[in-house]
Amino acid sequence: GIIREGESFLAGPLLDGTFLPVRVTTIQRYRVPKRMVRAGQAATLSLPQIEGSRLRKGMVLVSSTSEPKACVEFVAEIDLSMHHTNTPIRKGFETTVQIENIRQTALIVDMDKEELYADKQAIVTFRFRNRCEYVLEGSRLIFRSSNQTKGSGRVIQVFPQQQNSTTN
């Protein structure tokens, strides 16, 4: 995608799962003013409609014509590549999940098997611990826990957050 000065977007998700309309007033690359940036380029954007205290890592800018949905829970096909303890992974296992620009602790709240050991696959439902995130189906993910557990996978289903619900 391309971001141009003066264009409007939606920024979010905020802590309540909503997206805020914003307008890019200025763009800088390496402290040099620019009129536009392309996907993959690093840039600083001025978004005066949103205070800096509301910005956080993991937020996204999406088209103002889209209807983005934040999620707290999602389903993923995972492959557990390393697990160094004798205890299998079960519902209730907590891990750090990374999806695109998101890095957050998540809890496994459901699995298609009772137990999961190294070099095995499963379909699991993750729930973010701290806040909702913008996750797209098909996104690749990795997860890790205390350098003892590592795995990867793909998001296959996203459950949009209900607007009036709160996250744990």
Image (spheres, rainbow, N blue to C red):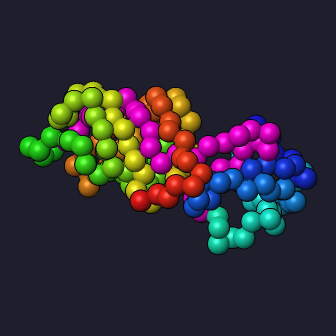
Residue drawn at (80%, 65%) of the image = 49
Residue drawn at (17%, 35%) of the image = 115
Relative placement, left or right, of 138 versus 69 is: left
Relative placement, left or right, of 48 versus 104 is: right
The C terminus - image quarter: bottom left
Identify the residue at the far front of this view.
164
Q: Nearer the viewer, residue 84 or 7?
A: 7
Relative placement, left or right, of 135 versus 62 is: left
Magenta stretch: dominant secondary structure: strand
Residue drawn at (65%, 54%) of the image = 18
| Highlighted magenta segment, given as a residue range | 56-83
Residue drawn at (87%, 49%) of the image = 7
Q: Nearer the viewer, residue 129 or 149?
A: 129
The quadrant in which residue 121 appears is top left
Instruction: Note whether residue 42 is visible.
Output: no
Q: Position of residue 148 (x, y in %)?
A: 22, 49
Numbered label tally: 0
| 106 w.r.t. 68: above or below | below
The quadrant in which residue 154 appears is top left
Q: Position of residue 118 (x, y in %)?
A: 19, 34
Q: Position of residue 17 (x, y in %)?
A: 59, 54
Q: Position of residue 109 (x, y in %)?
A: 31, 44
Q: Is residue 80 magenta?
A: yes
Relative placement, left or right, of 37 versus 88 is: right
| 97 w.r.t. 152: above or below | below
Q: Nearer the viewer, residue 133 or 98?
A: 133
Instruction: Note whether residue 112 is visible.
Output: yes
The N terminus - image quarter: top right
The quadrant in which residue 117 appears is top left
Q: Nearer the viewer, residue 77 or 83?
A: 77
Q: Is residue 39 magenta?
A: no
